[in-house]
Amino acid sequence: MRDFLKNVLATLTGLALFGVLSAGGMVMLLVAIALSGRDSGPKVEDKSVLTLNLDRGIADAPVSVNPGQVFQEALSGRTTRQPVSLRTAVDAIEAAAADKKIVGLLLEGNLPATTGYATLREVRQALDTFRDSGKPIYAYDVNWSERDYYLASVATDLAMNPAGVLEMNGLRSEMTFFAGALERFGVGVQVLQVGRYKSAVEPFTRQNNSPEARQQTEALLRDLWTEVITTASQHRDLSPTQIQAIADSGGLLMATEAKTTGLIDRVAYPDEVLADLKKLTDRKEDDKTFRSVGLGTYAQAVAAEKKRGDRIALVYLNGDIVGGTGSTGQIGSDRFVKLLRDLRLDKDIKAVVLRINSPGGSAVASDLIAREVTLMRKEKPVIASMGNIAASGGYYIAAQGSKVFASPNTVTGSIGVFGLVPNFQTLANRNGVTWDIIKTGRYADIETTSRPRTEAEMALLQRMAEQAYGTFLDTVASARPLSREQVNQVGQGRVWSGIAAKEVGLVDELGGLQAALKEAAAEAKLETWSVEEYPKRLSFGEQFLSDLQSRLPEDARSRTLLGDRLDALQSDLEIFELLDDPANLYMRLLFNLRIE
């Protein structure tokens, strides 16, 4: 019923748009929108500063234009810039380091919380390359969070507004638990769980973290935080221990305090930083601004100059793993099995890099995709590059690569299986709804949601979960230099940081996407190569028609505290839409693990 209503509303919206705008008006609108998303052309003047606005965010994979969002912004007069992709940012920064026309780099703005630390680490490494070229890096804004500071601390001139605040108080993970609400509303939940640390079901069965969940989350946060303060201290006259002391003493510093502690170089107003940038680019004092080129525009020039050669396919696997084709932001097994098969059979594709950012999902869907990776590995190099998160089903797929790369701050592991079995008997009975089942076999109604499962039914389902876990162990052991027992020891649903995963043998190398691409080229013995990204992004027109056929776009929420909370809660509740595995078994990380 819900999907039906969405389709009806989407169709009506499409008809209304075409009726109001007319055929000619629609064509002009589409052309205008398409042109507005492009730069007029890559024009780089001598003595220019490359600017990177962090407000846009940095997405691990390229982001397609959302037509619904474009229309909403056109009507509201509000514009949201698309995030820059990781490869775009890294390629542009590294090229600028060697470009004589570029004399410096400016970091400004504040990163959204959706930008992960593994992504930022690779951008940070590119900034290190730029700094090593001898060119200055300016970083300026009113406020800096830990996430912002992780990048900004590389600057040769790190400044903030006199009224600003620098946040350096540590990382946290705040879980949402629904057990009390489910009980109150009369929704029963029975769980299947294999693995001591497989705590993905806890939000539905508990009101706080179990000791095991707390233990693994604390260890994970320690690893991630250690990497953050170690990296942040590299170009500051501070040690990680000193930064930790700052965090423990309060961690919220006014600009002058940040300067006194050595976290920043100076306190300045925008006009003072602007004057320095004018001087750097040989502009006069009365000029409005300094010579600059935006990273997006500069990236176009870089892409145009890239050498062509043998082809390496870069496949982005982002989101929850589900059966069927899946939607935008999901890894649909049907869609990705076909894509990987096509790449395997394409003789012009010499190697494949799988860039995985997924907490896992359906056990069956994960296995189908992993099987295709195994087949591909027999014919050409397949390198797995784990991004911010590649856990459970995401790791299941990654483990099949001929070599597995992870960032030190990747969240991975979670080798385990769980099942969630809800029933609505109490809720229904309270409202006068009952069921009467007639069946021809003892277990014919084992999938019903009208009552709790019996002990015999739960025993049967638990046995299936244990078999799935055994398959998980065997699959990983067959692809990794580990025995089944060793995989079990580091499995049990335990979550690891990338650096810890390498220590226990789940990962081959610590490195980002660029390192994985170089490894793929080396294994394929390629001297020159070009990278082709998959899945192919839809054009604006294709995306527009696709949206009309699927559903109405959701309203874009402003980045406020309330909006962020509502988005997080909505994300948590959307979990139920992901429970589509035919066996009701899942290889997935904690449902709502967020690190802030």
Image (spheres, rainbow, N blue to C red):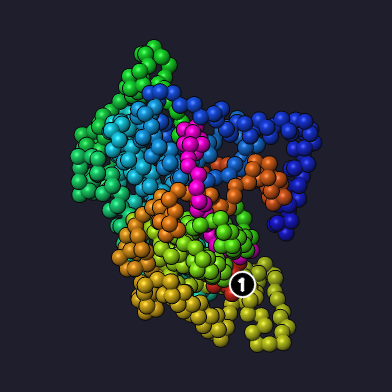
Q: In this view, does 383 lie above or below 53?
A: below
User: Going 42% across and 34% down the picture, which residue do you hit?
Assistant: 52
* Residue range highlighted in magenta: 297-324
User: Going 39% across and 78% down the picture, which residue do you hit?
Assistant: 484
- Asked if one can make out residue 578 in the rendered structure from this viewpoint, the answer is no
Image spot of residue 3 (x, y percent): 70, 56
Q: How many marks?
A: 1
Q: Is residue 562 above or below residue 504?
A: above
User: Going 52% across and 46% down the picture, which residue do you hit?
Assistant: 62
Image spot of residue 181 (x, y percent): 52, 62
Q: Is residue 449 above or below residue 290?
A: below
Tell whether 391 sits left or right of 125.
Answer: right
The quarter holding residue 516 reads bottom left
Residue 46 colored magenta? no
- Asked if one can make out residue 317 in the rendered structure from this viewpoint, the answer is yes
Q: Look at the numbered disc 1 and give the secondary structure of its residue.
A: loop
Image spot of residue 362 (x, y percent): 55, 67
Image spot of residue 136 (x, y percent): 30, 31
User: Going 40% across and 62% down the picture, which residue do you hit?
Assistant: 404
The amino acid sitting under disc 1 is Pro
Q: Nearer the viewer, residue 516 or 200?
A: 516
The quarter holding residue 555 reads top right
Residue identifier under label 1:
582
Residue 299 colored magenta? yes
Q: Is residue 533 above or below residue 590?
A: above
